[in-house]
Amino acid sequence: MTVTLLPFSHADPDHRPKGDARRAQAVAAGRERRRWEVRGTVQGVGFRPFVHRLATELALTGRVRNTGGAVLIDAEGMPGALDIFELRLRAEAPPLAVLTGLAQLPAHDSGGFDGFVIEESLPDTVAPRRPKDRSFLHRNLPPDAATCDACLAELLDPADRRYRYPFINCVDCGPRATIIDELPYDRERTSMSAFGMCETCAAEYADPGNRRFHAEPIACPDCGPQLSWHDGAIAYAGEEALQAAIRCIAAGGIIALKGLGGYQFVCDATSADVVATLRARKHRPAKPLAVMVADLHAAEHYARLANAERRLLTGPARPIVLAVPRTPRSHPPIAPNVRADSACLGLFLPTTPLHHLLLRALNRPLVVTSGNLGGEPLVIDDAEAWARLRAVADGVCGHDRPIRARYDDSVTTAAAGRPAVLRRARGYAPAPLTLPIRTPRPLLAVGAQLKHTFTLAEGATAITSAHNGDLENSAAHDAFTESLDRLSRTHAITPEYAAHDLHPGYLSTGYAHRFPESRRIAVQHHHAHIASCAAEHSLTGDVIGVAYDGLGLGDDGTLWGGEIMVADLTGYTRLGRFARAPLPGGAAAVTHPARMALGYLTGLEALGSPQFDADLVKRFAERLDPHEVAVTLRMIARRVNSPVASSAGRLFDAAAALLGLRDTVSFEGEAAIALEHEAGSTSALPLPWRLARVDGLWVYDPQPTFAALLDAAALGAPATALAAAFHETVAEVTVALVGKAAAIVGDKPVCLSGGVWQNRRLTETTIAGLESAGFDVFINQRVPCNDGGISYGQAAIAAASLQGR
């Protein structure tokens, strides 16, 4: 059966020759005609070719075409075959497709069909409309997908015409969200529009038996994008560019490589000297770096992988997976300074053909990390790459296919056998999420400040952006607004309401103030954390929420961060918290764990425990700079620039400082990472702790915990054992606090959320304790537990609030 790409009439999209006689014959033969509109992630994922193959197999005639954000199908055949066709549309959709709606529409009565064809796309102006149910009209951008096995086999086959071609792809893999300009998804509305197909590619594109049938980014060495290399002295193209990049890395250099969603820095992961150079140039002294290995077999040599981690590594998203490292026996070891003091190693598999070629040529693991400078957005512009990245890179390996949208690499983990996304970006975003309570009006949730994302919502659909980094400067803010404009346009969502954090100093809150006051919905930070977990698990009733993070503004004007609450998607009641301690120097305390330790030792909220022993406090302070200690103690005593916070994150910072692991840090969470690394898998019993009753709340008093920690350290107890004991203590305290909450509100599902739950040991120990106590426990899995999930939680709360109105 031949396939042709047929034009449509803008005035009459169903215009065809009438064919009355043919139609009469069809009716006489018992044939029927039906029309379906399919919604979800159905463009850019091989859905139209799938429909064509299925219709042909079932002897149906008709057509399939993209509309604004959907696929429209007209099919004619025997009723039984049409019934089977509809069932198989749902059951056998391509692996990258996600169907959210399949509606049968009135069939048009134009003439009969000759065969089954894929027609040219319909613009929105003539696509079917449902004003009363706009959620059915949502457009979903398909995420990028890593190179599939079939394309990889061709890439490495000397007999194949795409042998060693770095831009090989098909309907099952390759760039999607990062190259799309507009929907419907067709080549002319992508950054591939500048590359005309050669005759051979055009034939593959039109062949129903070829897996590149209607693969919009189809390309080959004769007609597609080409590699380039320059290092300030010499330039190469094509295979010579690839060889120059390989030589640079092999000689101990660092390259800037153009990936799917932005530039990356790439270097030898087995050389401590090269890694140290990268860290010095990138001003990233301690934050762990991700490592790319050739395949799952290599990954098994470098980490202890459970089934959940294997599935994450090999899925089409190809995220970074945090796993427990081990020393390989037959592979070159990864330099220790790659992961610094992290308990986990971030591993991932190649995401593009170019990555595959580099790894096979170099035969070693590679550091692959974000191509940006500290605090700046990921670089995607070719001209900007050399200007901004040459401070780090010895050369740039780019290409001439433009990147339309910025997408960093996603980061995932598996805790207690549950896969979880910690940074939702390439491969996952902007795939839609579901809101358990529909929003009656379209809305924007602007997120928080760190690990920023935003969420657009309409009906039951939530589109959460990719990770934007920390929203702390104008460049990051510009990247946020640019991404918002793009997603608003391509998803056809114009928000009427804005949900935002309580903190007035966040740049995201400032953006929300562009909306009238009557259309702004303020959401408490930790309520948003809990809602993000509850909503993704479709929990709309009361839950007991445990929100542990660094800092968030509470509704009483103080800083929160260790919170127990009963909550649903419309409100919350605080039932417990951690004790308050001062943050000497305010925000500066985040980068000075030793100051936090002094805050706990000399300014902890009085809850009935004895004061810390003066000699123990003095012994801790003696190893610090005397001037800094004096200034810090004066700030605490006088309450000058020392706001108090009930923060679990700062508690971990203080413990790390007390054990001598970190006095200062270069990024938030570094001290807690070092503490988890020190604890490892060491067995330990909990340290002493107590709960106090304050103003109707149960409050964890850490004075007995820290006193025991200091006593044991003074007696020579190893830091490893004490770090493990501290983790056991916080887990046991959490189970006790949840038990106290349940005694007040009854048994409810328990939701753990907030950045502290990125700590795998704490999460697994706490889940085990809660489940032993009979609780059903939920964690964030599809959205990050850290502040990257705040915007989704804000959207869920705002939707429920608007629905309640």
Image (tube, rainbow, N blue to C red):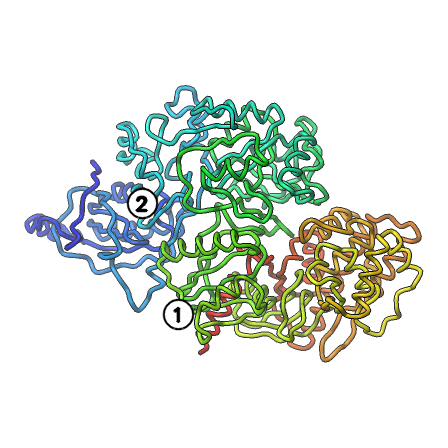
**Residue at left 20%, top 47%?**
62
| Percent of width and height locating residue 236 | 45, 24
Residue 612 as seen in the image, left or right of residue 387: right
The answer to whether residue 775 is above or below residue 607 is above
| Percent of width and height locating residue 457 | 43, 63
Residue 19 as seen in the image, left or right of residue 46: left
Question: Which numbered disc, 1 or 2, marks the residue that appears first in the sequence?
Answer: 2
Q: Amino acid at mark 2?
A: Arg
| Percent of width and height locating residue 672 | 72, 53
Circle 2 packing at 10 Å, graded few (<14), some (14-19), many (20+), is some
Q: Quadrant of the C terminus?
A: bottom left
**Residue at left 33%, top 66%?**
133
Viewer-closest of 271 and 635: 635
**Residue at left 57%, top 69%?**
502
Disc 2: which residue? 189
Q: Which mark is residue 441?
A: 1
Q: Are marks 1 and 2 in contact (CB under 8 Å)?
A: no
* Residue projecting furthest to the left: 21
